Image (spheres, rainbow, N blue to C red):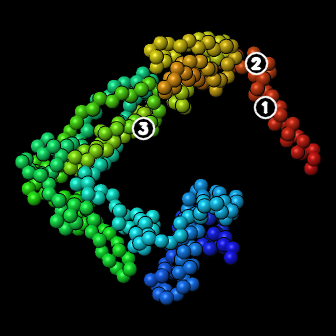
Amino acid sequence: MSKRDYYEVLGVSRTVTEVELKSAFRRLAMQYHPDRNPGDHEAEIKFKEINEAYQTLSDSQKRAAYDRYGHAAFANGGGGGPGFGGDFSDFMSDIFENFFGDAGGRGRGRGNGGRERGADMRYNLEISLDEAFHGKTAELKIPTSVTCEVCTGTGAKAGSQPKPCPTCGGAGRVRATQGFFSIERTCPNCHGRGEVIDDPCPNCGGAGRVTRERTLSVNIPAGVEDGTRIRLAGEGEAGLRGGPAGDLYIFLSLKPHPFYQRDGADLFCRVPISLVTAALGGEFSVPTLSGTDAQVKVPEGTQSGKQFRLRGKGMPVLRSRDVGDLYIQVVVETPQKLSKRQRELLMEFEQECSKENHPESTGFFSRVREFFDGLSGST
């Protein structure tokens, strides 16, 4: 008698995901379990068939071989996964471990004496653009939990030690039987620690840690950007009862700069220039974050909005020798509060100007006239 297709046995498609595969297996295993179908030989056969199919398809390597060669992949002793055998309670315990995690009876912290990893911490640090350019060493004062110096993290009073929990015998778990299921849960007496403290440390109250303010020295490398995260391993909260400490994450934010705007490694700024400088040309200097002045030459006839690029005058790239550029956009400033003589000079200047002096505006208005003339001529 030929074997049925494993996907057909579990009632799933060949594109089934791992989660969907587990769900289908759990549903069918419950349905055809021998204890739910006493004396039903057909249900027992189906249960073995379901188990065999799942053992193959839940293994990525076996599934790949089965997809390619079918049952022939296991014809020479490879086997499509073991059939049902052994103690059923152990088998179902494994199922519940996969599906329900801690509820299946193998929870975290079992018999570890309550030694739990400390929580990770976050510290927000604001720095200036100049500090991001040069890098710095920051001194941080952080209130956090540290290992109790009196009990050295055990939580017990000096001269005493934690004792195994009498309820769970130090396992941290207790077992409860419901029907044919045997399910473990966290011990209600020791809360999964496996130990109890009869005489807690008066300094920390049995927690094994106390709150203190620590001073840390943190290196801020040159080129960091807004939102950069720095991880300091083991500098978070101390763990409970001697457990490992968590990590400290420092999130950097940059203060707005009064002159520069940043985009990655490039810097941008706007510089106003006079009408005369724009028309006749000139030169001006711009201070940079490196501490030197950069000279910018303005050619004759420069228009407002013109952008000049100064290579290598931007921000350093983090963990690299590369440096960004500095982009300077000039804005031609229109004179205000003119005197009578200044107005007369400008009027004379306007009368002396020709179309060649203002090619952009002259061309623009010429195109506008042609456009509207074309509209009126078409109607």
In x, y percent, where is residue 362?
A: 79, 27
Q: In the shown orientation, is residue 245 left or right of residue 73?
A: left
Q: Amino acid at mark 2?
A: Asn
> What amino acid does circle 3 point to?
Arg
Callout 1: 10 Å neighbours few (<14), some, many (20+)? Answer: few
Q: How far apart are labels 3 and 2 at the CA level?
A: 54 Å
Q: Residue 229, which numbered label?
A: 3
Residue 357, numbered circle: 2
Q: Quadrant of residue 219?
A: top left
Q: Is residue 370 left or right of residue 135?
A: right
User: Mark 1 belongs to which amino acid?
Assistant: Phe
Q: Residue furthest left?
A: 159
Could you tell me how far apart the alpha carbons at marks 3 and 1 are, in whole angstroms? 51 Å
Q: Residue at x 70, y 60 (%)?
A: 69
The tag earlier along the polypeptide, 3 or 2, is: 3
Vertical placement of residue 276 versus 13, above or below: above
Residue 48 position, x and y percent, is 54, 74
**The label number, if any, that marks residue 57 in the structure image:** none
Residue at image mark 1: 364
Circle 3 sits in a helix, a strand or a loop, which is it?
Answer: strand
Discs 3/1, front: 3
Q: Is residue 67 visible?
A: no
Q: Which is nearer the eye, 35 or 273?
A: 35
